[in-house]
Image: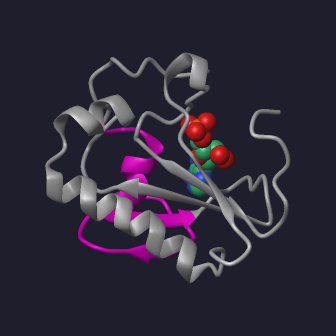
Amino acid sequence: MPIDPTEPYDDANIFAKILRGEIPSSKVYEDEWAFAFEDINPQAEVHTLVIPKGSYVSWDDFSTRASAEEIAGFVRAVGHVAREKGLVEQGYRVMANIGAHGGQEVPHLHIHIFGGQPLGPMIA
Ligand code: AMP
């Protein structure tokens, strides 16, 4: 069920629990600004999620409320993870689902990194 990205941040969402270490995840990378882990239901050979450490529901929320440092740190972390995964040479896809039309299901901003294979058309 897609979320309403205009709702206030819900501390009980599953990615908040992963950040707090309350439920396990397959951690790929962590720094001051971001946490990356493997998607539990991978849609490509490589399917890794990167989330900001701050409490942001969506891209809209993040891009309006986050500090310049948080935004820079998060964007750099996405690039770092893609490099660490060895995706740069062959290319990869970065995607964020936002709100109902975007099909966002978890109300904590997350970037999907897909790669490791040709990814086909942009929108299936
Ligand atoms: P979205 O539709 O963009 O909100 O995608 C949510 C993503 O989170 C989906 O690709 C799920 O497979 C993934 N997901 C949900 N729960 C977990 C979890 N506990 N660990 C890792 N990935 C998860």
Q: For residue 9, which quarter of the picture? A: top left
Task: Count the numbered circles shown.
Answer: 0
Q: Is residue 60 magenta?
A: no
**Can you say whether 65 is above or below 39 in the image?**
above
Q: Is residue 31 magenta?
A: yes
Q: For residue 85, which quarter of the picture? A: bottom right
Nearest to the observer: residue 76 or residue 42: 76
Nearest to the observer: residue 68 or residue 32: 68
- Whether residue 113 can be seen here: yes
Name the residue rendered at 56%, 31% in the picture: 105
**Can you say whether 101 is above or below 50 in the image?**
above
Task: Residue 88: give x, y in percent of width and height.
Answer: 62, 75
Name the residue rendered at 21%, 56% in the picture: 70
Task: Residue 72: give x, y in percent of width and height.
Answer: 26, 60
Indicate the quadrant containing the C terminus: top left, top right, bottom left or bottom right.
top right
Please provide the residue range marked out in magenta: 11-37
- Whether residue 58 can be seen here: no
Indicate the quadrant containing the N terminus: top left, top right, bottom left or bottom right.
top right
Name the residue rendered at 68%, 58% in the picture: 114
Task: Residue 7: give x, y in percent of width and height.
Answer: 32, 18
Task: Residue 8: give x, y in percent of width and height.
Answer: 27, 23
91 left or right of 60?
right
